[in-house]
Image (cartoon, rainbow, N blue to C red):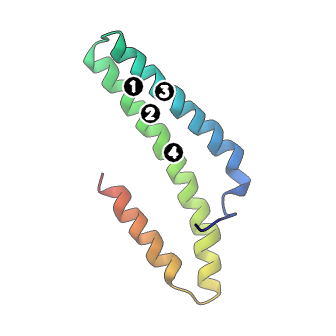
Amino acid sequence: MKKAASYAGNKDLLLRRLSRVEGQARGIARMIEDDRYCVDVLQQIASMQSAADAVAMILLEDHVKGCVADGLRSGKEEPVDEMVGVIRKYLKR
């Protein structure tokens, strides 16, 4: 498994945001358990997806500024190919 330090400066921020996403998921589960209105549940799911997307964007930015930039400086193209692959997978959802 590769390790990266590119997001080290944002690690606490990322973990806080992910804790919120986790809380949102638990809240959505409670809404379903309580038979809440479909549209209300869907709105909360959209909110959770937006929060997860925000985490992904922070990670992507850190990856480009750190790992990809370092790779390019050292003459490697692998980080760029890897990043393009990740973006393709992410956009397919």
* Residue beneath disc 4: 54
Of marks 1 and 3, the one in the foreground: 3
- Residue topped by disc 1: 44
Per the image, the residue denoted by label 2 is 48
Q: Nearer the viewer, residue 77 or 29?
A: 29
Q: Earlier in the sequence, mark 3 or mark 4?
A: 3
Q: Which residue is mark 3?
A: 24
Q: Alpha-carbon neighbours of circle 1 within 10 Å: few (<14), some, or many (≥20)?
A: some
Mark 3 and mark 1 in contact (Cβ < 8 Å)?
yes
The span from disc 3 to disc 2 (Cα, nearest Å) is: 6 Å
Mark 1 in CB contact with mark 2 (< 8 angstroms): yes
| Residue positioned most to the right | 9
Q: In the rendered view, tell whether residue 11 sits above or below residue 43.
A: below
**Mark 4 surroundings within 10 Å by alpha-carbon count, few (fewer than 14), some (14 through 19), many (20 or more):** some
Task: Name which residue lies at 33% across and 21% down.
Answer: 41
Identity of the residue drawn at 42% across and 16% down? 30
**Spatial separation of the CA atoms under disc 1 and disc 4:** 15 Å
Mark 2 is on which residue type?
Met
